[in-house]
Image (cartoon, rainbow, N blue to C red):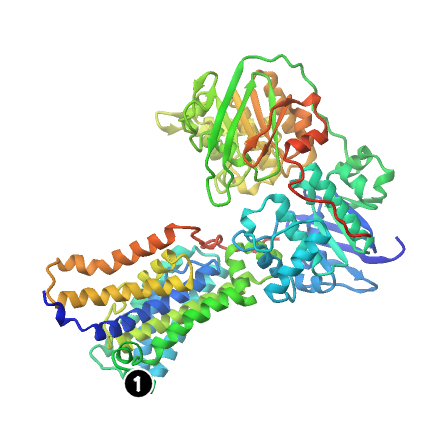
Amino acid sequence: MDLSAINPILLVASIMVSATPILLAALGEMVVEKSGVLNLGVEGMMITGAVVGFVVAVASGLPVLGFVAGALAAAVLSLSFGVLTQYLLSNQVATGLGLTMVGLGLSALIGKPYEGVKAPTLPKLDLGPLSDLPVVGRMLFSHDVMVYLSLLLVVAVWAFLKFTRAGLILRAVGESHDSAHALGYKVVRVRMAAIFFGGACAGLGGAYLSLVRVPQWTEGLTAGAGWIALAIVVFASWRAGRVLVGAYLFGGITVLQLNLQAAGAQVPVALLSMSPYLITILVLVLISARGVHGAPASLGRSFHASH
Amino acid sequence: MAETLLSIRGLTKAYPGVVANDDVSFDIGRGEIHALLGENGAGKSTLVKMIYGLVQPDRGSMTMNGSGFAPARPSEARRAGVAMVFQHFSLFDALDVAENVALGMETPPPMRDLARQIREVSETYGLPLDPGRTVGTLSAGERQRVEIIRCLLQDPRLLIMDEPTSVLTPQEVGILFETLRKLKGEGVSILYISHKLEEIRALCDTATILRLGKKVATCTPAETTARQLAEMMVGSSFAAPSARDHAKGAVMLKVDGLSLPAPGAFGTPLRGIGFEVRAGEVLGIGGVAGNGQDELLAALSGERLSPASSVLLMGADVSRQGPVARRASGLLAAPEERLGHAAAPNMSLIENGVLTAARRRGLVSGGMISWGRARDFAEEVIKAFDVRTPGPHVAARALSGGNLQKFVVGREILQKPQVLVINQPTWGVDAAAAAAIRQALLDLAGEGAAIVVISQDLDELMEISDRFGALNEGRLSAIRPVADLDIEQIGLMMGGAHDMEVAHVDA
């Protein structure tokens, strides 16, 4: 094995790119689950965002417009989940699984004519002197704007949940929808807003896959990224900071094992390929083994305002 | 009272199939403690929800301070000065005290100021509380303080309290009453909902009595006897349980050194519990909610296994046996939570009967359910315990709480247990049904069964138990004959006042 074939600067840089889509989707899902809704359709929303973002970016030539369209498309799709589960009181698990299948099928249909087309990609952000720093500049400060936006979003979600009144109400709704209703908060409205936000985040993550990470359209492009995002939310004990750790860990090991494969490591390829999943789950389980797990108490339960 | 604060005129609210409130009118004076009295289902909750803006009346009007008052949502009611302490607390277990208080306020101050205000108010009114504690770790009495403080921080003009004393020890009740009298002295009006007659006679200036959604009377409770109030509330007299002779038999159930860790983050560990119950005897176990009642029932029924030789049934060690084996040997249990624990909500009464009585009543042969015999059994329970239902095919969730409770209790009693453990046998059940259930328990004991009744209703325990013990933080007090006890001693057995102190604001 030739470890010198792995360039540490490129490694770190590609870890950030690899982690960003999962980070975005997991953050959105965390907010949804904090409001007490379990949306298993992350994979479907992500791939919808991926295909719509790709199509719009190709058609307009503007990658930014692609991201906006991808986020909107996934958010609108998530509203169908919202209407079914919040107003028609359908089962959240079954509806979420259905949403994933709808998203996978819909994206294959929309994306068929675009296979093999090249998308305009996001330019690297020029951070002036920061980007010119040796080593660190290449590693951390020469990415596209979405990488930094996703990191800002981690801080924003954390602060929103911890410090704002709206965030407190959202957590309260997820904790006990009956109590929240008794105090006069609009449970269904809060949850619809959270579902919409979660959809938009998953869409952004999907668009990042098809426009930056890959960057082209193939059927089934997300390849389970949505499911990993869901797992990360649970094992991160519904905390924004740990979601960041989980996403970067998963992204990091994915990139690392690809590099190891390329460097000809004497480990079975199957083992390397499964390592990101195993190690991410193992580490997050170890983190959350101590202390309370903090699942929102009303997670996955339907709310109906009876008299 | 000279001035009227809230005037209610002709309030009517109908739900499909039932008129919850029918043309109800009364006035609440400024600085008055006004009792709202009635059985379960008399329409107290609906009336209060209309005042608090959770439900809109079909007809009728309210005036507050002389101007119209029709809150469309709780926030409007709160702005008008109405605050409410809920019966089943409206608290969030995973959030801390300050966050819970903030959620009940219209415009909460920044968290740091709020924590300081909580400390000030809690000290002024003798309700000590740490704003940083997680609510899930608080006792029932402390949780109620959170609700009360949340209300007091908003300078309410009308404080609504929905059955506030059902979870308190006698000492805590005394201190709550002091707090309420101070508030009354400050000009706050209080609407006090309860069905505990002696409390109302001790505390309230005026009482309005509801029956089946209609106002029966408004009276001055201090000038009315408890018996008169009860008759107005129920509308007819009901039989009090009859006494029986106390011939005691052999020890049926012996619990010795029963300790179990807490089942979850907010559960209570059991610590060294020991008692004996003899044939023909009723052992009453009291205590404030959340002091190990559910955990004790689970350990006795076999839902949670306990260390070897800690539970002995008729001399045989059943500690390591599950519920099915214990049922087969004659130890039956009825848990507190009717829907979801004692009965499966979406299954019919017939199916719910099979779930516990399959073995003892021979409803299953060769692995196949005999639906004919199952139906007969369900009908037998319905008939013997006067369960009001269209038939045994009805889903458990469709029954009212009292009727389902009669079914659940009857189902166990008709299996002729040697030992019956029952938690909260009459919780949320109207007075007539409660009397019937208590009588059935006494009859069962009269036939030679040993009965353990876990309850938070002290009056009930005094009425039917031979001996009494209290749970406090998972420990069981010494067991004493009921005849030797007074309310003061019982309060101390329950753990006294849980570090509350009397309000020391000068009225």
Q: Residue at x 64, y 41 (%)?
A: B498
How crowded pointer 1 is (Cα within 10 Å; few <14, some 14-19, many 20+) is rated as some
> Residue B383's spot in the image, x, y percent?
59, 28
Q: B337 and A267: which one is in front?
A: A267
**Quarter of the figure with residue B471:** top right
Q: Which residue is mark 1?
A: A59
Q: Chain of mark 1?
A: A
Q: B142 and B65: which one is in front?
A: B142
- In screen coordinates, is B389 left or right of A236? right
> Residue B428's spot in the image, x, y percent?
63, 39
- In screen coordinates, is A64 left or right of B237? left
Amino acid residing under circle 1: Ala
**Quarter of the figure with residue B197:** top right
Q: B432 and B304: which one is in front?
A: B304
- In screen coordinates, is A251 left or right of B69? left
Q: Residue at x 42, y 59 (%)?
A: A238
Report if residue B464 is visible in the image. Answer: yes
> Residue B218's spot in the image, x, y percent?
83, 45
Report if residue B25 is visible in the image. Answer: no
Q: Residue at x 51, y 39 (%)?
A: B268
Query: Disc 1 on helix, strand or loop?
Result: helix
**Quarter of the figure with residue A185:** bottom right
Q: Would you place residue B359 above or below residue B176 in this image? A: above
